[in-house]
C-alpha cells in the first residue's frame, strides 16, 4: 500500500461505492460491508450508517476508530459475503482470504486486497440516526491492483460497476479544493 494524499481521499467515497469497514475490538479484527456512506467534508470527513444490530458497532463505539476500505469490483463477491455474516462467530479475514495490514494511526487493519484504505477516527456518533461521523487521518492506495473499477449497490441485491469517467473540472474549478 502506498501513501495517498489525504486531501484527495474523499474522491474514493464521493462516487458512493460499496465499502468495507474494519475494526479491532482489542482482541479480534473484523470487517463489515457498508454501502450507506457519504462525504461530509473535503478535510476529509465521512458519515457511515450502522447500529447495534451489527458486531462491528461495539468496536466502533469502544475504540472510536476504524478503516474505510474501498474494494474494486474484482472482489465484489467476497465483499457481499462479508456483509452477509457476522464477526460475532466468523473470522472474516480468514474465511475470505483477505490480508490485514498494519495501519499507521489506528489499530483496525488495512485490507491489502482493497484499492484504497482510509484510516479514520470517530468524530461523532449520532445515536438517534445510527450515524457515525468519521475523520479521515491517513489514506493508502494499492497501485498493484489492475481492476480499478469500484461498484455501487442499488439496494435490491443488484450492483452497478464504474463506467466511463468524464472530466468536467473546468466547469467547476471554483468548487474544487486546492490540489484535487
Ligand atoms: C452490499 C451490502 C451493503 C451493506 N450496507 C450496510 C450499511 O450501510 N449499514 C449497515 O449497518 N449494514 C450494512 N450491510 C450489512 C452488514 O454488512 C452486515 O450486517 C454484516 O454482517 C455486519 O457484520 P458484523 O456483524 O461482523 O459487524 C450491508 C451488507 C451488504 C451485503
Image (cartoon, rainbow, N blue to C red):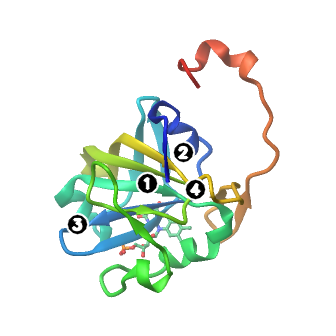
Instruction: Give the residue pinned by disc 1.
Output: 68
| Label 4 residue SS | loop
Q: Are marks 1 and 2 in contact (CB under 8 Å)?
A: yes
Q: Earlier in the sequence, mark 4 or mark 2?
A: 2
Seen at 24% across and 64% down, the residue is 59
Q: Are marks 2 and 3 in contact (CB under 8 Å)?
A: no
Q: Which mark is residue 13?
A: 2
Give the quarter of the image for residue 32.
Answer: bottom left
Residue 155 is situated, as x and y percent measured from the top left of the image, at: 61, 64
**Residue extending furthest toward the top:** 174
Mark 4 touches mark 1? (CB < 8 Å): no
Q: Which residue is mark 3?
A: 58
Report which residue position mark 4 lands on: 115
Q: Nearer the viewer, mark 4 or mark 2?
A: 4
Does label 3 point to a residue whose CB lies under 8 Å from ligand 1?
no
Q: Is mark 1 within 8 Å of ligand 1?
A: no
Q: Is residue 103 left or right of residue 169?
A: left
- In space, the residues marked 3 and 4 are separated at their CA atoms by 26 Å
Up/down of 72 relative to 76, above or below? above
Amino acid at each position: 500500500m502506498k501513501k495517498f494524499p489525504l486531501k484527495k481521499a474523499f474522491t474514493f467515497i464521493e462516487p458512493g461505492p460499496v465499502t468495507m469497514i474494519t475494526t479491532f475490538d482489542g482482541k479480534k479484527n473484523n470487517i463489515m460491508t457498508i454501502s450507506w456512506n457519504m462525504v461530509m467534508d473535503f478535510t476529509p470527513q465521512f458519515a457511515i450508517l450502522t447500529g447495534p444490530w451489527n458486531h462491528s458497532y461495539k468496536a466502533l463505539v469502544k475504540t472510536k476508530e476504524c478503516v474505510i476500505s474501498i474494494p474494486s469490483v474484482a472482489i465484489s463477491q467476497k465483499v457481499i459475503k462479508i456483509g452477509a455474516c457476522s464477526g460475532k462467530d466468523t473470522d472474516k479475514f480468514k474465511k475470505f482470504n483477505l490480508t490485514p495490514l498494519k495501519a499507521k494511526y489506528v489499530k483496525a487493519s488495512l485490507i491489502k486486497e482493497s484499492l484504497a484504505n482510509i484510516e479514520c477516527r470517530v468524530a461523532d456518533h449520532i445515536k438517534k440516526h445510527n450515524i457515525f461521523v468519521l475523520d479521515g487521518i491517513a489514506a493508502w492506495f494499492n497501485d498493484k491492483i489492475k481492476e480499478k473499477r469500484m461498484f455501487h449497490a442499488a439496494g435490491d441485491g443488484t450492483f452497478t460497476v464504474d463506467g466511463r469517467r468524464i472530466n468536467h473540472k473546468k466547469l467547476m474549478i471554483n468548487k474544487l479544493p486546492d490540489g484535487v
